[in-house]
Amino acid sequence: MSKITAIAVKPGKKPIVKKIENTLKSLQNEVGGYIQVVYPWAELVGLVCDEEAKIKGKQLNRALRDDNGKIYDIVAGTFLIVGLDDADFCSLSDANIKKFSEMFKHPEEFIRINGEICALPL
């Protein structure tokens, strides 16, 4: 089994770079459930999360924003940022480790103001 370098982002915590086994079981253990992968960025990376995190009532973690900075979704529970290659997950590049560690460096708290959800960095 091979290990990949990924970023783990837990609610209320700063992101950490870690080596994880590139197996379904290991990914499920990291996020605490069945995995879902989304591809919100142009870079060859995937966001791996628990597909049922919101249904399970897991703590809201970080906001996903569009190009204008507007929140379009919030990831609940622990998630991973992993690299992508032709057929599988792979280690993140140094540039992507830097970019996504910076993007998610501040834990967020969420509140509703005038019908809009706002993220407050902690």
Image (cartoon, rainbow, N blue to C red):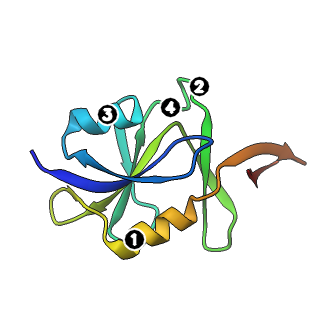
In the structure shown, which secondary structural element does the residue marked by tag 3 occupy?
Answer: helix
72, 79: nearer the viewer: 79
Q: Return the disc, 3 or 1, that comes first in the chain's sequence.
A: 3
CA distance separating discs 3 and 1: 22 Å
Q: Secondary structure at mark 1?
A: helix
Is 112 positioned to the left or the right of 40 in the image? right
Residue to which mark 4 is pinned: 53
Of the two numbered discs 1 and 2 in the rendering, the one whose residue sits closer to the viewer: 1
Residue 40: x, y in percent? 46, 62
Q: Earlier in the sequence, mark 3 or mark 4?
A: 3
Question: Which residue is at a point 31% across and 65% down the rendered structure image?
Answer: 92
Q: Position of residue 121 (x, y in %)?
A: 73, 54
Total of numbered circles in the picture?
Answer: 4
Amino acid tagged 2: Gly
Corner quadrant of residue 106: bottom right
For the point 74% across and 44% down, which residue is it? 110
**110, above or below 63, in the image:** above
Pick the quarter of the image with the N terminus. top left
| Residue type pointed to by label 3 | Gln
Q: Earlier in the sequence, mark 1 or mark 2?
A: 2
Gap in angstroms between the C-alphas marked 1 and 2: 30 Å
Q: Which amino acid does the dot numbered 4 rest on?
A: Ala
Measured Cα–Cα span from mark 2 to mark 3 = 17 Å
Which residue is denoted by mark 1 in the rendering? 96
Residue at 25%, 61% (x, y): give it: 91
Residue assigned mark 3: 28
In percent of width and height, residue 119 lies at 74, 52
Which residue is the site of mark 2?
Answer: 57
Label 3 or label 4, whichever lies nearer to me, is 3
As drawn, 119 above or below 36? below
